[in-house]
Image: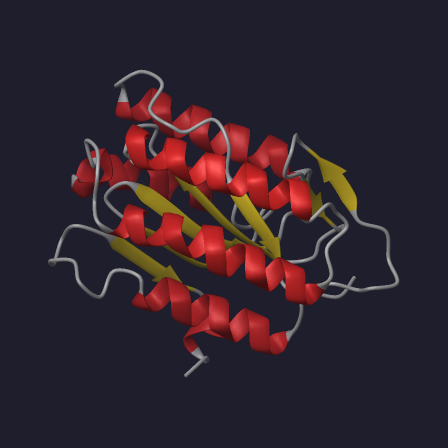
Amino acid sequence: MCDFLDGNEEIQTHGGKLPHWQQGEVMQFVTFRLGDAMPASKLSIWKEKRDIWLQHHPEPWNLKTMKEYHRKFTDQLERWLDQGSGSCLLKKPIHRLFLEKTLMYDHENRAPQCAWVIMPNHVHLLFTPKIPLPQLIKAWKGVSARKIGQGSIWQRNYRDTLIRDASHFANAVRYIRRNPKNLGRGTFTLWESARSMAVE
């Protein structure tokens, strides 16, 4: 199967109001965060605005509507995450190491990795899922939380985006690479495959 989204192939969906999408082994860009990474007051206002917007923009969305959603809502979340709210457990190298090992355990078989960055309070991943996405994310969160040993640390949900084409892939790699640009040394971990390192 192709790495990129095929408009002629079926897309499997699961989840609630904003479903998660998977199309076989099409590459995914996924973000998940620590449970305390988002200030509750900001998140409440964000959800209220998003709910109103969703009432006026029922799915399925065309590309223009999807871009508008991300510009209005996803980008705002990313800015808040990058401000470093919450406990920032992943700032500690030992905690990041537990997550790194968890991700790379599946690298050869269940989820070949292209690139990822572990930030102090969230993670961005670019990979090819060989099994259902919810199963992978649940395993990564569960195993890493147990190893870190501080209880239930992860946000329940996650954000996923199917990679549309080579340009989208390159943009995702660049995003991951640039995400920690304002962080100090030793506070994040960036990993790239040979394919990702070839992206300028």
What residue is rendered at 34% in x and 28% in y? 35
Quarter-of-image position of residue 183? bottom left
Q: Is residue 183 visible?
A: yes
* Residue positioned most to the bottom: 200
What residue is rendered at 57% in x and 71% in y? 168
Side of 125 relative to 150 (left or right): right
Nearest the camera: 145 or 88?
88
> In this rendering, is residue 177 above or below 116?
below
Nearest the camera: 57 or 90?
57
Side of 178 relative to 171 (left or right): left
The image shows residue 141 at horizontal and vertical percentages of 44, 30
What residue is rendered at 86% in x and 57% in y? 9
What residue is rendered at 32% in x and 37% in y? 42
Q: Quadrant of the C terminus?
A: bottom left
Q: Quadrant of the N terminus?
A: bottom right
The image shows residue 52 at horizontal and vertical percentages of 57, 40
The image shows residue 29 at horizontal and vertical percentages of 53, 55
